[in-house]
Amino acid sequence: MSDCHATDKKHKKGRAFFLMAVLVLCLFFPVRGEAKVKAPKMECHAYAVMEAGSGEVLFGQDENKVIYPASTAKLMTAIVCVENGDVNKKIKTTSEIINGTTYGTYCLGLPVGVKFTFKDLLNISLVSSAADATDSLAAGVFGSKAACVEAMNAKCRELGLVQTSFDNPVGSDIGAGFDKTYSTAAEMAKVCRYAMTIPMIRSAVEKSHYDASAGGMSCNTTNWFLRGMASYDEDRYEIIGTKSGTTNAAGHVFIATAVDDEGHEVICAYFGNVSKESTFSSIRKLFDYTFQKYDAGKLQLTSSNYDVRCSKDLGAVYDTYASLNCYPTSRDGLFHPNRAVTRTELAAMLRGVNGLEESGVLDVFEKGNRTGNVTAGRLALLIRDLFPEHLTAEAVEEALAGCTGTEGLTEEEKEAFALFIKNGLAVDDSCKNAGQVLTRKQALLIADRLSDHQVRYAASHPVFLTGETGAQLPEQAAAATTEAAAEATTAADSTAATEATAAATTAAGSTAATEATAAATTEATAAATTAAGSTAATEATAAATTATASTAATETAAATTAEDAGGLPAYEELQCGQMDALAGFNKKWMEHLINQITAAAENGA
């Protein structure tokens, strides 16, 4: 067979193995973002119903098709103005901006030369959808409308909106000569989700009426739900915003936000109905459908948590695990990141973030005091119980240098806290105090770091994945081998036992260590049997057997971590292990597995 043919066959085998392995993994790890229930057919261009807490689209119709956002684009204008402007600033209207608004857009008729507050222009823009207020705000913050548009598109890139673009602050589209303003229902739902985390915007869109502080201006909302012009099931949920719009190209559009009394928040981004009446009626039907499915157990909803879901310090971590429904819930829809975490709340996070749903250790921890606070030292002890490790006395002393609150800890607790510090689980300096009462924010960040630690731990402890018991640490295995060899020599009192022990010693540190130890076991067992069936012989046999298993476990662990040295991890262990042990494992371990599968495929499996 030619080298070329052999190489091609090897590559085909690798590709086939890769695809088969990925298929198996997909069975255990559901794809994020798939529809949760059947989407009702509606008469519109597109719609998306999103759970605001997690950012997942629950269901939709052509939600990824390009549409025109009309005045819902003003949500993005508001976002960039609040984030980049001085909210305490007063902005003077100019004739250039007031008279330069896009022809055909709705204007409130703001007077020229009047100083409006930032809050005035923001509220008029979002409540009444007045283009003159929007343009005045955009130019007042950025110096020009063009600079505001640049900021809007930069924000799109930041939020990962790949199908959204703006070329004006008010949402004028191709019908008015603006051909670079477009989006999708799903991506405009994301814009709304983000906007509703900004208190100033959230407050504005909840208003049915607004009176400006200057110019004698007042306005009513375009949201018929807030004005009582469109009905909905107010006993089941409340519609609190958000933004309407209409152009000839877009049709009638509205993005609505609803909350229930459990703190859940749902967004319906609806685009392209033929009339305003049918738009609001259709949105009501979709909200009814959503909450009915939740009540029937067909949908899971996450607490809104709008105070953290898009925050710069916690938002990315929060979104990673939001769909797991493992966060504390509050009727006010807030996460309260600085509130002390309880044992029950921490246990829920660890079960979700770290895939520990079946952990008996967590069950015992939680039942100890469900509403009790958790200190950094107590969490360290819990983590050590979940992922057993040991440190030398010197390593403990070194890790605890600079830490506080360790004076009253037992030796076991000190070792656990030292592991907590050594493994990089302290997310801030306060966590280096063993007596620090942890907050919800700290608990989530620690759980996230723990997921990284789990990958490293699993790589060096194969038993963690396969579900086997009795694994020993490397130093324990080495000690067991030495002790077993000594006992075998004494019990047998024969040349065979001595030679077997010598062979095992020579093979130490080599690839043949496992085979040498197995040979030693066989010969030592035979010698022990010859030794008149004494008690010593029986003990020697058992000890030698234990040594073999321990050494094999050590060799497997070493092979698993061989990737950095150019070799593949112990892939066979992962392939043939108990897959149910992997099914509940966290996202980062899945990525680790895929990397291993890819490497194996590239090398021909």
Image (spheres, helix red, strand yellow):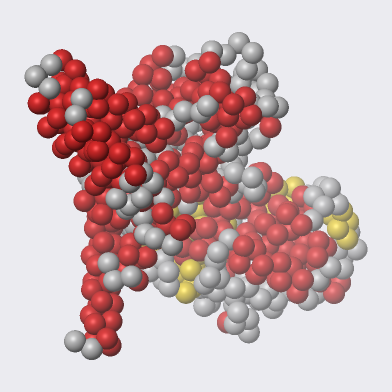
Tell me what residue is drawn at x 15 percent, y 26 percent: 528
The quarter of the picture where residue 363 lies is top left
> At which x and y percent is residue 559?
36, 51
On screen, residue 448 versus residue 295, left or right, reads: right
> At which x and y percent is residue 47?
42, 63
> At which x and y percent is residue 431?
63, 29
| Extreme residue toward the top, this view | 408
> At which x and y percent is residue 418?
57, 27
On screen, residue 128 versus residue 453, left or right, reads: right
**Where does the C terminus fall, quadrant-wise?**
bottom left
The answer to whether 60 is drawn above or below residue 583 in the figure is below
**211 or 328, nearer to the observer:** 328
Q: Is residue 264 visible?
A: no
On screen, residue 512 versus residue 33, left or right, reads: left
The answer to whether 290 is drawn above or below residue 111 in the figure is above
The answer to whether 528 is drawn above or below residue 573 in the figure is above
Tell me what residue is drawn at x 85 percent, y 74 percent: 96
**367 or 193, nearer to the observer:** 367
Count of labels shown? 0
Tell me what residue is drawn at x 61 percent, y 66 percent: 156
**Where does the N terminus fall, quadrant-wise?**
bottom left
The quarter of the picture where residue 136 lies is bottom right
Tell me what residue is drawn at x 28 percent, y 88 percent: 4
On screen, residue 137 versus residue 490, left or right, reads: right
| Extreme residue toward the front, this view | 495
Q: Is residue 160 visible?
A: yes
